[in-house]
Amino acid sequence: MNLDQNISAIVTGGASGLGAASARRLAAAGVRVSVFDLNEEAGNAIASEIGGAFFKTNVADEQSVDASLAAARARFGQERILVNCAGVVVGKRSVRRVKDTGVVEAHDVGSFRKVIDVNLIGTFIMSTRSAAGMMSAPPLSSDGERGVIVCTSSVAAEEGQMGQIAYAASKGGVLSMILPLARDLSREGVRAVAILPGLFGTPMFDTLPDDAKAALAAQVPFPSRLGDPDEFGHLVVQIAENMMLNGCGIRLDGAIRLAPR
């Protein structure tokens, strides 16, 4: 896909972290970008910075997604690139023994369901609705390409750590969805690719003390540091531009393999 002002993109979770970096990279390549997020202040700031538009969106809610898609398409036309970065994380073990009392507690269903709703079902809702729009648009090239969907999985999909059962399940679901999604859309010229980021310097890590961040960075074989969100955004652009990338998951992790904890 040739990236220019004739191409529009939607980035969910685009107000911060990997989503904001993806929005910036796409805009720098000339693409018109719609930022979907729940954080209005941060979302509007990113949209203003890149010359895009912000739409308050709950990706786990079908009506919210439909309203935002309609508004974004009215502003910039049918999106040809969808980047799914919206996500949440909950750190809880499957079962835990309460300190001092010894009482055994199972993981609550509510927080597990929330992670699945946002990370997996939200990705499904956005991907299928965006693909439906792409399929109605004319091809962009003689190969018949109509669009590309980039989904954010995680290395936790393959090496979930202690306390990551909900997060790992959601990201494993995203990864498993990619191949059948790509196959379903193949005749219509719509691609689907997942990125499995490792340890990245996102807002989630900002709350950690410097020594904890340094310890995490030291676990990465090379380069021995946290990933820069811009490197994620760079890969998003490369996926959009390279038509042979389809139906796969790409690890972006500096060769790290997560330990049990």
Image (cartoon, grey):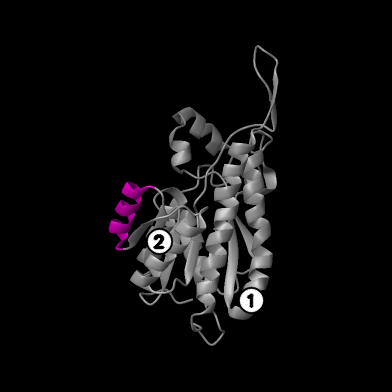
**Looking at the picture, which amino acid does disc 2 mark?**
Arg
Q: Nearer the viewer, residue 126 or 183?
A: 126
Q: Is residue 252 among the parts visible in the rendering? A: no
* Crowding at mark 1 (Cα within 10 Å: few <14, some 14-19, many 20+): some
Residue at x-position 69% and y-position 33%: 94
Q: Is residue 80 placed above or below 178 in the rendered structure?
A: below
Residue where numbered disc 1 is placed: 186
* Crowding at mark 2 (Cα within 10 Å: few <14, some 14-19, many 20+): many
Q: Nearer the viewer, residue 90 or 243?
A: 90
Residue 19 place in picture, x, y as percent: 45, 54
Residue where numbered disc 2 is placed: 25
Numbered range of the magenta stretch:
39-51
Report whether 34 appears left or right of 187: left
Residue 86 place in picture, x, y as percent: 49, 51
Residue at x-position 51% and y-position 79%: 136
Residue 256 place in picture, x, y as percent: 62, 45
Magenta stretch holds residue 35:
no
